[in-house]
Amino acid sequence: MTCRIVQNSLSAHVDDLLPSDSRGAVQAHLAQCGECTVAYEQLLEVRRALQELPALSPPEQLSADLLVIASLERQRRLNRRSPAAMLAHFGERARLWTDNLMRPVALPFAGGVISALLLFAILVPNIAFSRISGARDVPTSLFTVAAVKSQAPFGFTEDDFVVEVLVDGQGRMMDYSVTDGQPFGQDLQLRRSIENNLLFTEFHPATAFGQPTWSKLFVSFNRSRITIKS
C-alpha cells in the first residue's frame, strides 16, 4: 500500500470506518513509514483538540427559523404537486393581494361617500336655484317663484322703468339694481322713492323643494300700475 493511499485513508482509519483488511494494511504501513506515522499522529492531535472544545447548543431562534423554512418548503411542494393545486394557490394569492390593496382604501372611501351624502342632504335645501320662467311655466312643488304679497302705496310721475329685486327666504327685499338703459340713473329723489316703496312691499319668497330660498324678480313700474316678473 502506497503512502498516498494510506494518507487518504487516515481520517477513516481514525474514525474506525475502514474494513478489517484495509485497516490491517494501514497499520502495517504505519509501522514501517515514519512520514505517514507523523501524519497519523497529527490527525490524532487534531481530533483530541476538537473533542476538548465545549459543546455549543444552537440558539432558539435558529430552531424556529428552520421550522419556518421547512414549513414553507413543504407548502411549496404541496402547491406544485398538480395543476389544480397550482391554480388554487395562484387564486388564493390573487385574492389576498386584492384584499390587502383594497382594505386601506375601503374605509376612507366609504367615509368620504357618507360625508358627501350628508353634506349634500344638509346643503340642498339652502341652495338658491336660479330659474328663468316663461309664460307657459307651470308651478310645481319642487320650485315656486317669488311673488308680491302686499304693496305699499306709491306715486310716480316719471316714465316707465324696471328694477331687479333680490328677495330673501323670509320675503324681504335685500337689494335691488336698475336695469341698463333706465332714464333715472342720476335722480336721487326717484331712487329714494323706489327704495321706500320696495322696503314696505311684502313678498312671498320663492321655494325650492318646499324650503324658502333666495330669488330674484323684475319689478316694472308704470305710471298707473306695477308689473311683477320672476
Image (spheres, grey):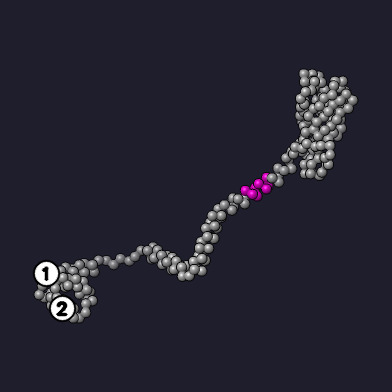
Query: Which residue type does callout 1 highlight?
Result: Glu
Please report the residue visible at 84 percent of the width from the left and 39 percent of the height from the top: 136
Closest to the observer, 167 or 224: 224
- Relative to 126, residue 25 above or below: below
**In magenta segment, residue 156:** no
The image quadrant that residue 11 belongs to is bottom left
- The residue range painted magenta reads 112-119
Q: Which mark is residue 86?
A: none
Q: Is residue 103 visible?
A: yes
Q: Position of residue 83 (x, y in %)?
A: 49, 68
- Relative to 118, residue 9 above or below: below
Instruction: Report how far apart the C-alphas of labels 1 and 2 lie in the structure.
Output: 16 Å
- Relative to 9, residue 142 above or below: above
* 112 lies left or right of 165: left
Q: Is residue 14 visible?
A: no
Q: Which mark is residue 35?
A: 1
Please report the residue visible at 75 percent of the width from the left and 37 percent of the height from the top: 130
Residue placed under numbered mark 2 in the picture: 25
Q: Position of residue 183 (x, y in %)?
A: 80, 20
Q: Position of residue 137 (x, y in %)?
A: 82, 40
**In magenta segment, residue 115:** yes
How would you rate the neighbour count of disc 1 (Cα within 10 Å): few for under 14, some for 14-19, many for 20 or more? few
* 81 lies left or right of 12: right
